[in-house]
Every structure is written in C-alpha cells, then in structure tokens.
Image: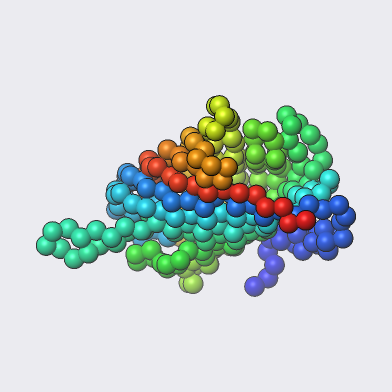
Amino acid sequence: MRLKFLSTAVLLTALPALAQEGDAKWTFDVRELSLTYSNTTVSNSEEYKNSPVSAYSTDSQYNIIGKLDTFLNRSTDSGLWQNNLMLNYGKLKIKPAGEKSESSESADKIWLSTDYNQKIWRYWNADVGPFVQAAFQTEFTANQDSPRYKVISGREGLKMFEGEYIKELYGALVEEYDFTYSHDKNTKFAWEVGARAEYPIREGVKLSGTAKYTKYFSYSKYVPTNLRYDLDLTAKMEVSLTDTLAFAPYVSYRRGQARGTEKTGSNLMIGLQLKYADLFNLN
C-alpha cells in the first residue's frame, strides 16, 4: 500500500533525529489497568446491528469491562515521543429462560500508536506545540455480522499537554484508511478535538475526564456503516485506596451517526471501576 499519511512520513523523518537527542528521560506509564462493572443503556441498536463499532450495536445490559492503557515515553526539553498500547474488551453472555445463550460485545478495541509532540510554548503550566501521530486500530473479534474493524490513521495538529490540570488538549486533521470491508476500502478525512483533564478535590480524591469529537467531511466512497460524526465522553471520581490503586464511580457516553441512517446511535455506561496506575522511570 502506498504511504498516504503525512503524519507517518513526518514521524519516519523525525525518528532518527529523536534517537540522537541527549538528556532524554524514558518512562513507562501504566495509565490504566482496570475492571469496570457497568450498566449499559443503548438506543437504536437495531439500526446499528451490522456496525463494526460495538458500542452502538450492543444490547442494554450489565457487564464487566477490562482495560489496559500503557505508554512508553521519551521526553526531552524540545519534545515528547509517546508510544501507546491500549486494549479494551467487554462481553456478556445472557441465557434467557427456554432460549439459547446470547452474547454481546460492549467494548472491543486494540489501539497501537506513536506520536511526537513538540514543545514550543508554555501556557497555563503546560507545554504547547504541533504534533503528529500514526495509529492502527482493530479489535479482538468481529462483531455479529460485520467483519473485524481495521483502520490505519494519521493526525496532524496542535496540542497542549502535560499541564497541572489539562493533561491533553488538541485539535487535529485526521486521515483514515479503513479496510474493514475488503471490497469497500475507504479513505476518510475528519476534524477532531480531544481533551483529558484531572482536578483534585481533596487529598486522595480527584475528578478525571476525557472527551473526543470527530467530524468526518470527506470519503473516497460510500459505505453505509461509516460514521458522519463520533462523540466520546468519560468522567470519573477517583478515590485512592493506595498510591497506585483507586476506586472510581464511572460514567461514559458515546454518540454517533452512520451515513446509512438518519437515526443516531448512543451508548451510556454507568459503573464502578477498580483502577491500577503507576509511572516507572527507566533511566
């Protein structure tokens, strides 16, 4: 496949220079290793039953979700290089009286990415600068009648990061090469904004949240299950049990609309989470 992503080209050009920078600090960040017990309410799932996005096609249910989110970071005075592996999976089997067992995925995501964030300015105790990212997303299993989700993506934009409260705030142009459907490979373009923040309420208690909104504006071909937009919000109140272990009431909301329907799909999850997080200095 031809190299399509500007972000990939920039990263490949920048990596040799990154390897020669001095005074680098290497860290391994286990941002989240968690189990979440949740109650999921889904609207219009019948319209999205063939969607490769499990969050829109699942049933309303109680379920348990496991998540691992890790980063290998290299930080210097001029930039931050991050390599992310995220695994997220949730599934529930239901056996109604007198009927066959049924199963439904409530979460299924494998995410691999590498990005470089340049430190040019300081604003509100955070670094600010341009960034580029190359990523690959797939899933553990195919969802119902749809094939396994497979997308290569690139992002180029501006980011504020590593602040006291704002851990990440960015706006980016996104290009995706979607080869979920072998007969309908599709290149898509979108605008995206995202944020991650933390705010301490008192010692041992903090609010944390993430937000991401992606608005697609160009497609190389018409695929009914491709999204027009995708909104993903998460909020937690984390109560520390130890230095690395926390208990958190958890709320997440995802909403989007496919090109093949006028109805929106949504996924509301309310649950309790047990979370482990730690940062390891590798120098």
Number of callouts? 0
250 or 239, nearer to the observer: 239
The residue under the point 36% across, 46% down is 38
Between 282 and 80, which is closer to the camera in this rendering? 282
Residue 88: % across, % down: 48, 56
| Residue 218, x across and y down, in percent | 57, 52
Outermost residue to the left? 98
Residue occupying the far top of the picture:
202
Q: Is residue 35 above or below residue 242?
A: below
Among the 4 quarters of the image, the one containing residue 206: top right
Display coloring: rainbow
Q: Position of residue 127 (x, y in %)?
A: 75, 38
Position of 100 relative to 204 (above/below): below
Query: In front: 233, or 264?
Result: 233
The residue nearer to you, when weighing 47 against 45, is: 45
- Horizontal arrangement in the rendering, residue 121 relative to residue 200 (left or right): right
**17 horizontally vs 61: left or right:** right
Observer able to see residue 108: yes
In which quarter of the view is residue 121 placed? top right
Question: Measured along the vertical axis of the image, is residue 182 above or below residue 5?
Answer: below
Which residue shows up at 47% across the image and 63% down it?
139
Quadrant where the C terminus is found in the figure: bottom right
Q: Is 213 situated left or right of 274 in this image?
A: right
On-image quarter of the N terminus = bottom right
Taking the image as drawn, is residue 155 in sight? Answer: no
Q: Quadrant of residue 249?
A: top left
- The relative height of residue 206 versus residue 43 in the rendered view (above or below) is above
Residue pictured at 52% horizontal, 38% vertical: 240
Q: Is residue 221 left or right of residue 102?
A: right
Q: Residue at the location (52% across, 56% down)?
A: 68
Report the residue that reaches farthest toward the front: 242
